[in-house]
Amino acid sequence: MTIEKNEAGWNLDNSYARLPKLFFTGHNPTAVDSPKLVKFNEPLAATLGLNVKDLQSEEGVEVFAGNRLPEGASPLAQAYAGHQFGHFNMLGDGRALLLGEQITPEGERVDIQLKGPGRTPYSRGGDGRAALGPMLREYIISEAMHALGIPTTRSLAVVTTGEPIYRETELPGAILTRVAASHLRVGTFQFAAQWGTVEDIRKLADYTLKRHYPDIPADENRYLRFLREVIERQTALITKWQLVGFIHGVMNTDNMTISGETIDYGPCAFMDTYDPATVFSSIDTQGRYAYGNQSYICGWNLARFAETLLPLLHDDEEKALELAQTEISHFSKLYQSNWLEGMRAKLGIFNEEEEDEALIEDLLKLMHKHHADFTNTFRALTIERHEGSDLFGTQEFSQWMGRWQERLGKQLQTKESSLELMRNSNPSVIPRNHRVEEALAAAVEQGDYSVMERLLDVLSKPYEHSPEQAEYCTTPAPSSLPYRTFCGT
């Protein structure tokens, strides 16, 4: 494997590779025939301290394709386990390789991972490759999430490989370069608890504390504080999903990061018509990961995480279980508090009143009853233009509006302050499914990336509320078939 010189600005470390060998297997990418750079995130590259021009050269593209290794890289596939739709399995990076950890000019440490670079020891019969459509989809959605202010992995580059891959049909192959705070997952800790020793769990926990929670004191209570902090971060993350109508689609424990970032954009999508039962994933036939279940699943996953830490919480098993249960018991109240705060902001409410929850729930019930669009309903309230939905012409909505206006009168802030809060809390644009599909079809089928570029530009300013964004606020045409997404990442 050729080593790329460091003109590109790579400043890689490999701290994960210094964990016990149990947690990974060193493995090189499989070279591809004729890579071509089709999408490159210049602003992100610059913040990482990378040379934007050099990375778009032939040598830079070879790195993104896995044909060359940047200086300092030590590629490896991470081992982890996970509950997939409630069933526990041994997993691992089946089509991903961690090249190393880039140390940015600000001193931050982020993972640089290739997604789709060939088979690994954890491929479980798969080819280790990825298709162009899903890689571009992850690029679009993850960058949109970043612009929305939601913690997420980022997309640095997508290259086509010049080689076909085979799923149900022949598809163009591609590799995504993903940037993450880390790829430590609940499933990583489950793997350690199932197949490692208590000392392995401790080393993994200490590594994670140093990397993501350095402010937690290294005292006897550090692992309990660790559990508490992870619960708080994940609760905050799921709340942000709910507030913009994002549905992850596959909230397995291996898709839940310890850092609190959104990861693994497979069958994800944004909800159009408000309905808590909304499911997009073609394989979620029972609705386990429906929009309305996401907070419950988050709590369930956190309980699985807490189980892995039991040996570190206390020497006495019963006391350890009691400590873990106490922390997990706070989740529902914490989520509800976060959600209420976020929903108040979406309605321009600064203070707290006992009536707020009923006011919010009643609006959501009306939206559900009248099949109102989630994003556009709050956008209409924000721009004070109540049109585009049957909801707004009903007597029920008129009565609700009166209650809302009366509620706004119970705070000291001005109307303009409330509208400003709403503008900052309600996106005017989201990556609507029909727009994403339109961009992917143009890119994959016609080699036309201009549709995707225009979409990305609009999505980069979701709170702008400009007239130019209006065409991206339109809902899809009526269809007798529900929108479905597929695991392909």
Image (spheres, rainbow, N blue to C red):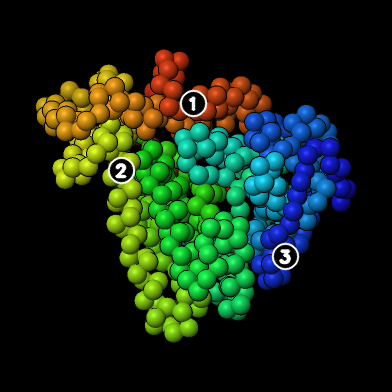
Q: Residue at x 18, y 39 (%)?
A: 359
Q: Is residue 48 left or right of residue 411?
A: right
What residue is disc 1 on? 461
Residue 36 picture quarter: top right
Cα distance, mark 2 to mark 3?
41 Å
**Looking at the image, can residue 31 be seen?**
no
- The x and y percentages for residue 314 are 46, 79
Checking the image for residue 18, the label placed there is 3
Q: Residue at x 42, y 55 (%)?
A: 232
Judged from this view, the residue extending furthest toward the bottom is 316
Q: Residue at x 47, y 71 (%)?
A: 221
Q: Is residue 333 above or below residue 277?
A: below
What residue is disc 2 on? 341
- The x and y percentages for residue 32 are 79, 44
Crowd rating for badge 3 (residues with CA inside 10 Å; few <14, some 14–19, many 20+): few
Of residues 50 and 392, the one drawn nearer to the viewer in this rendering: 50
Checking the image for residue 317, the label placed there is none
- The x and y percentages for residue 323 are 39, 73
Element on which disc 1 rests: loop
Tags 1 and 2 in contact by the CB under 8 Å rule?
A: no
Which three-letter amino acid code belongs to the residue tagged 1? Lys
